[in-house]
Amino acid sequence: MSIAHGVTTTHLVVDEPSRVVEDDTLAISARVRIRADGAPRPTPVVGDTQRLIVRVHDVGQFDPDALAALRVADPEDLTPLLPVLALMACRLDADLAIDAATCPVATSGVVAATAQYAAWWGWHGVGVQVRRDAAPQPASGGRGLFFTRGLDSASVLVAASTAGHPPTHLVGLDWVDAPYDIADHGDVWRATAAAAAESGLPLVRVTTNARTFTDPLISWDFSHAPVLAATALALGGVVDCVGIASTHPAGHPVPFASHPDVDPLWSSATVRIEHRLDVPGGRTARAGVVAGDPWAARWLAVCWEQSGEGNCGRCRKCLATMCSLWLVGADEVIANRFAGSLSPSAIESLAESVPLGGRGITASVARELAAVGDGDTLDGLSVRTSVTERRMARALGEAWRVVLDGTAAGR
Ligand SMILES: [Zn+2]
């Protein structure tokens, strides 16, 4: 299969495909190199690996049909690697030359996804050459959902379960590879496994070294959906679809790594990637859903700053979540799940730590705080692109003083 798209003399060359089940783990990998004008060029990676790998762990837990599907699948089928390879190629102004097999649905999809990226951000729209097509795997009837214990995925899980169509499997990405193989990350995984066990749903553990390849090219904000999709596509035979919880509320589909128009394009003929908006509101609506479910509230985890399990209560992700929880009256969840406390000065202190020129999550807090505070001022802040996140943090802290003073008597 060959899909021409961009015009480039640079190729991301993918060969030496491998798909093995060993030590209760399915590992799908390939060698990845760059060739420019017919000559090799160094591939920017963290460390010195040349092999991109996606793994599914503890495969012995799957039912016999699913396990058989994993074992007999085409050993040259590199479909799960496609989303990550496409993202890399986009950023390297390269096309993909794959000396292996891929699902034609997924191959067409990555061309369409990178064309969307090209339209949004001017990145390279990727063309793909593949030696041959891979056949689809058997349908399983399973439905997966990525689960991190954060507001987005936990609220989707609670809402889907309440609506009577919960997933059959939770899917969790465990960081055991560079550059996020930090010493006490095992605590985070053990807590996620304990949360899943309490929920009664099986937890599928997936891992990948994709960030070894993508971090030198693009931040996690832009790579997370393709990386999640890659691990999901390795679950053919176990599930027929895997959901990625939307970051943004309905009606705010700003160009972003996870987007309703792009996430489904990462699908294969076997595994459909779904952009899940079961809770269409923003983080405060999602906080309300999580706070209303004792299980989801007890296991809530949002912090990327704290090493190991727990929420620091001081970083912008924590403080944004605490603001949302406060807005829905979930003071107990704030007290039980966060090490720091919510205060105007804590928010103002973000001005010292957020990136210069960054906006991000503080803007979403401003938008949602507008519902109870000085709406015009705060909503204006959230949409004015000239306002940096540092200035916004200072303004938000001030606004919180007003909101807290005005509502203290009523709480
Ligand atoms: Zn934190």
Image: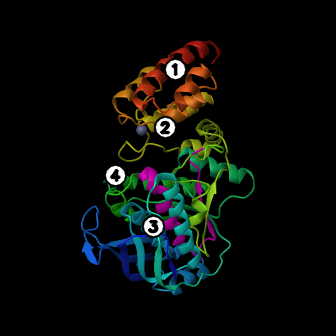
Q: Which amino acid, mark 2? A: Ile
**Nearer the viewer's eye, disc 4 or disc 2?**
2
Q: Work out whether residue 323 or residue 313 is closer to the camera in this orientation and state it.
A: 323
What is the CA distance from the residue labelled 4 to the residue labelled 3?
32 Å
**Nearer the viewer's eye, disc 2 or disc 1?**
2
Q: Quadrant of residue 251?
A: top right
Judged from the image, the secondary structure of the residue bearing numbered disc 4 is loop
What is the CA distance from the residue labelled 3 to the residue labelled 2?
27 Å
State the quadrant of the C terminus.
Answer: top right
Q: Which amino acid, mark 3? A: Ala
Kindly indicate whether the residue at mark 2 contacts the one at mark 3 (C-beta within 8 angstroms): no
| Disc 2 target residue | 361
**Nearer the viewer's eye, disc 4 or disc 3?**
3
Position in image of residue 87 (x %, y %)? 44, 63
Residue in the image at 66% along x and 49% along y = 158
| Disc 1 target residue | 400
Task: Tell me the number on the disc at residue 86.
Answer: 3
Position in image of residue 301 (x %, y %)? 49, 45
Task: Tell me the number on the disc at residue 309.
Answer: none
**Nearer the viewer's eye, disc 3 or disc 1?**
3
**Which segment did they paint magenta?**
220-248
Kindly indicate whether the residue at mark 2 contacts the one at mark 4 (C-beta within 8 angstroms): no
| Disc 4 target residue | 184
